[in-house]
Image: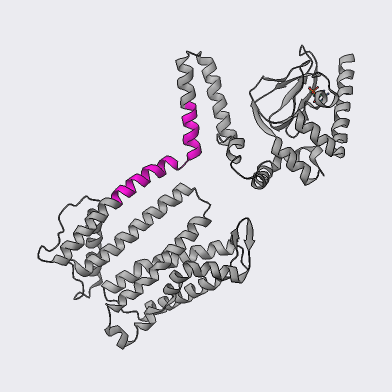
Amino acid sequence: MIAPDSRFKKIWDFFVFLVTIYTALYIPISIVFGIRPRGIFLIIELVISAVYIGDMVITLRTAYFQRMKLVTDFKAISRRYLKKWFWFDILACIPFGLIFSFDSAWMLFPAVGVLRMLRTAKLIHSSVRIRRNSNMNPSIIRMLFLILFVVIFAHFVSCIWIEIGSITPYGDTDTAIKINHYIQSYYWTITTLTTVGYGDLLPDKESSLQLTFVIVLELIGAAIYGFIIGNIANLIANIDIAKSQHKEKVDKMNSFLKYHAVPERLTMKVNDYYAYLWDSRRGYEERNVINDLPLSLKTSVSIQINRDMIEKVPIFKGASNAMLEEIILNLEPTIYTPKDYIVKEGDIGYDMFFIKKGSVDVVNSDGSIKFATLLEGQFFGEIALLLQLPRTANIIANEYCDLYKLNKETFDSILDRYPEFKKSIAEMAEKRRLEMLASKAK
Ligand code: CMP
């Protein structure tokens, strides 16, 4: 079975997508210009059929995710495929190119030749897969697909216009003339679809077919135009949702500070904080974002996000997964700005802290003795919780500090159930307490 997220599958899907775009562009052109599938074009059509058949086999051999499980059962995969995409894909496999290479079939051309257009049905399935697999910004992907579909739709319309419009290419054999016919037709389609309508290329007033086609196209054009403008405005606003939401927050805060005539110096500090928020976490509030997820997914995402920090904390080395999961789910991210007092000597302790980023100084009450500087991966605030004492020192942020807070309740319940962890924390607390006493005695 092939994994749905494997590299091979992604490359294959992209290849099929390119082949499909070629098909969608080439087939209508070959129909209106009466290009008979012969020589190299026949070979290409046969190769495409082979690729499409191969794609069906690969799709049937690719597992899929459902309800958090990877489904690898062939029967389940085929059932799912048969429900929808199979029918689009099977149409695309039929080698109409080969059929029309026979003279008797060619006689039926172009009426039956239009059947070859069925191959372009594959475009829908192929695009869905590419959109699903892509690592690109979803808004950019949507915009690219919107453009692609408008371009291909306009291509189809241009080909129909060549067929029924005032541009009749059948008699011409010169490629340059054909290309010019096509470009004129594409130009006419775009001016009509975008409602620009210069009116330099006109339908024949005597031809009801042409006039009807133009009426329908104008109606579709108005709808498409509105759809595109609406979508593009929406997509541009959403290209970087995080950035626009962050900017909105900053603007709101600044007008609030202005309204209250907060001094400029303080306003600058607030803005500096927001700049840090953006640099360190793209403005995302981890808690708020992942709280939407169910517990199991929240745990996996939290562990993934905090993997670096967990690896840096020595007391977590060798800890059981159950304990790590419990701690991680209860950690609360907090930020301190430079020179903030995170902990004050003599206060009652309600939390202990892990340093994700930044550094802090451990000092006595008047700041005359520095006991230690703690860096990323280290923790503090455990003594008050463990020994039921008031805080034994001041902790001051040296720079912006990204910390994780663990409240006393969780701390106690974890220590009760994981004696090994309690032992290592207690050892560290005792060592620190003795160090502190020794420094004070000097
Ligand atoms: P707590 O007493 O709750 O609050 C102050 C914290 O400073 C204390 O817990 C320890 O985590 C930390 N601390 C105290 N002494 C030292 C030291 N010598 N080295 C490192 N950290 C210390």
Check the image and report above or below for 424 versus 125.
Answer: above
Q: Quadrant of ligand 1?
A: top right
Residue drawn at (54%, 16%) of the image: 266
Which quadrant holds the C terminus?
top right
- Can you give x and y, in whole percent of width and height, for residue 158 in the image? 26, 63
Instruction: Tell me residue 350's x, y (percent).
Output: 75, 24
Task: Evaluate whether residue 285 shows in this view.
Answer: yes
Residue at the outermost bottom position: 104
Lateral position of residue 197 relative to residue 347, left or right: left
Q: Position of residue 394 (x, y in %)?
A: 76, 18
The quarter of the picture where residue 437 lies is: top right
Q: Quadrant of the N terminus?
A: bottom right
Where on the picture, by quarter, is residue 295?
top right
Expressed as whole percent of the image width and height from the top left, the position of residue 178 reads 24, 69
Q: Quick check: 413 left or right of 32?
A: right
Whether residue 193 is visible, yes or no, is no
Nearest the eye: 115 or 244: 115
Mostly what secondary structure, the magenta segment?
helix
Identify the colour scheme used.
one colour
Q: Is residue 344 left or right of residue 26?
A: right
In the displayed structure, does residue 363 sit left or right of residue 172? right
Please tell me whether residue 229 belongs to the stretch shown in magenta.
yes
Tag count in the figure?
0
Extreme-top residue of the structure: 366
Which segment did they paint magenta?
224-250
**Picture residue at 47% right of the left edge, 22% below the top:** 254
Which residue is found at the position 59% from the left and 68% from the top? 76
